[in-house]
Image (tube, helix red, strand yellow):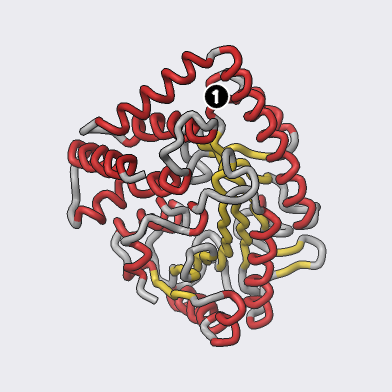
Amino acid sequence: MSIQKHLNTAYTKWMEGTGPYSHIVISSRIRLARNLADFLFPHLQSPEQAREVFSLGRKALDTPGVQQKIGPLAFITMDELSSLDRQILVEKHLISPQHAQNEGEGRGLIMRDDEAVSIMVNEEDHFRIQVLFPALQLEAAWELAGQVDDLVESKLHYAYDEQYGYLTCCPTNVGTGLRASVMMHLPALVMTNQASRVFTALAKLGFVVRGLYGEGTEAKGNLFQISNQITLGPREEEINGNLTAVSRQVIEQEEQAREDLQKEKLTQLEDRIFRSYGILSNAYILSSEEAMGLLSNLRLGVDLGLVRNVDTKTLNELLVRTRPAFLQKMAGKEMDAFNRDFKRAGIIREALAGS
C-alpha cells in the first residue's frame, strides 16, 4: 500500500458525514496507549531499541491472518516522510502534532487502508492504537480498537501491573490507557454565549475540552474535542458509556440553542449563514482562520436545512483540503501565506460550485 495515496487524498473514513447525530458530532475516536514490558519508554530508549519496537509491531500485524481480520495495513517509518507529509497526517487526524515534530529513529505509523485504524509507533508510548469513525460511534470504535489491541497483545508482552493496569509514559494515562473523544460542532452554544458554562460543567464531571487537533491546540470553526480525563479506576466500557451519555447531553443543549436562534433571531441567523455562503462562493483570498469561521456558519445552515445544495461530506473534506500542508502538497511546492490564501479560496469556490 503506497503512503502517497493517503497523502494525496484529503478524504478519510471519519469524513463520511453519516451516522448517529452527524449534524453535530463530526467524529468519534478511541485511542489506547500501550508499552512493551521489556523496553524503556520511547524518550529513554536507544535508537536500536526504537527500531526493534517498530519491527516487533510490524511482525505482529504484518500477517495474512491478522489483516484478514482487520483489513490491509501500511507500515510507514516517519523518517521516510518530509515534514510537509507528516503535517498532512496531522491535518487528517492520523497522527499527533507531537509525532510529526519529534525526531529520532524507530518512529512509525501503521495504518489501515481506509485510515479508520492508525497506530503511532514510538510517540509518547510504544504504541498508540487509534480508531476514528464518523459521527457518534464510540461503541463501534471501541470494539474495533479492542480487536486490534487483542491481536497485538497476543503476539507481544505489554507492560501491565495487576494493581495499576497498563503502564504508560505519562501517569495520566495509566490504567486503561484509554482516551475516548468526540469532535463536535457547537456554533449555537458559542453564538448564545453558553459554551463556557457547558465546558465548565464538563470539567467538573471529569471531562476535558480541547481544540481541533487535541491537547494544546485552539478551537477553530466552533469545533471542539471532548474527552475523558480519568483513565485509572473505571473500566473501558464505563468510560465510553459516560462520554456517550455526556455527548448526548451536549447535543441536546446545542439543538436547543439552535432552536432558540431560529425562533428569536432567524433573520440575523439567515443573514449570517447566507453572507458566509456568499463569501465562500465568491472570495479569491481566504485565510485559514476566516475560512474555518465561514465554513462553520455554512455547516450550521446545512444542518438546519437552510442550505440544501451542499453536503456534509464536502464540508468535512474541506477541513483537510484547505489546511496549509495539504494546500502545498496539491500545489507541488511551498507557498507563502498569500498564495495559500489564494489557493484555499479557489478550492472552496470549486467545491461549493460542484455540490
Mark 1, Cα crowd under 10 Å, few <14 / some 14-19 / many 20+, is some
Label 1 sits on a secondary structure element that is helix
- Residue 95 pos. (x, y %): 46, 58
Q: How many marks?
A: 1
Comparing 169 with 19, the one in front is 19
Q: Which quarter of the picture shows residue 225?
A: top right
Residue 163 visible in the snapshot = yes
- In this picture, is 195 found above or below 75? above
Horizontal placement of 81 versus 159: left or right? Answer: left
- In this picture, is 9 found above or below 353? below
Residue furthest to the front in view is: 308
Comparing 170 with 143, the one in front is 143
Residue furthest to the bottom in view is: 64
Residue visible at 18% across and 40% down in the picture: 339
Residue 43 visible in the snapshot = no
Comparing 94 with 168, the one in front is 94
Quarter of the image where the C terminus is located: top left
Residue visible at 73% across and 58% down in the picture: 175
- Residue 243 pos. (x, y %): 71, 45
Which residue is under mark 1? Answer: 190
- Residue 316 pos. (x, y %): 45, 46
Residue visible at 54% across and 65% down in the picture: 117
- Residue 322 pos. (x, y %): 33, 44
- In this picture, is 220 found above or below 166? above
Label 1 amino acid? Val
Residue visible at 62% across and 73% down in the picture: 36
